Amino acid sequence: MNTVLPLAHATVRLRFVRKAGENTVNRHITVGLAMLASAALGAAAIQTLHAQAKPPAYNIVEITIKDQDGYTKEYLPVITKVLTDAAGKFLVRGSKTISYEGAAPAPRVDFAGFSGVWADSGHGYAAAPTSCAA
């Protein structure tokens, strides 16, 4: 079925039905190239998503100090080394805490932040002592 559209400067002929014996290889090549291009686009999108920065990790520690000298000499150097080895830093250190709701927190609260690689590095507070026996 052919449709002829007469225009002022040209005649446009639209063909809606294939002619008998016309080669369909071009259609298969076009579909194959479209599938290949889609796969490449999907792979690029996945690589972009994987390349995004990992979110940071935070650790909030409530500390009740029973022996100030032992805390300063034994615990603090170890925890500071573990923190720096894990690409972290103290964001907030405080000795006066206030509770607006619920039970009162420990007398000292430390807030540490780690870059996104910390979760993959295998480091953490587990390597540091959890109590000071001094």
Image (cartoon, rainbow, N blue to C red):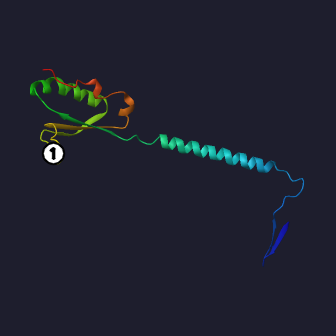
Number of numbered discs on residues: 1
Q: Residue 91's x, y, as percent?
A: 23, 40
Amino acid type assigned to the residue bearing label 1 in the image? Ser
Figure quadrant of the N terminus: bottom right
Q: Mark 1 sits on what residue?
A: 99
State which quadrant residue 53 falls in: top left
Which residue reaches farthest bottom?
8
99 and 56: which is toward the camera:
99
Q: Residue 93's x, y, as percent?
A: 18, 39
Dot 1 falls on a residue whose secondary structure is: loop
Figure quadrant of the C terminus: top left
Q: Residue at x 15, y 36 (%)?
A: 106
Q: Is residue 94 above or below residue 133?
A: below
Which residue reaches farthest front?
102
Q: Tell me if 49 is positioned left or right of 115 in this view.
A: right
Q: Residue 12's x, y, as percent?
A: 80, 70
Q: Residue 50's x, y, as percent?
A: 48, 40
State which quadrant residue 114 falls in: top left
71 and 80: which is toward the camera:
71
Q: Residue at x 22, y 29 (%)?
A: 80
Q: Is residue 89 above or below residue 5?
A: above
Q: Is residue 4 above or below residue 36?
A: below
114 and 63: which is toward the camera:
63
Q: Tell me if 5 is positioned left or right of 69 in this view.
A: right
Q: Residue at x 14, y 32 (%)?
A: 64
Q: Tell me if 61 is positioned left or right of 115 in this view.
A: left
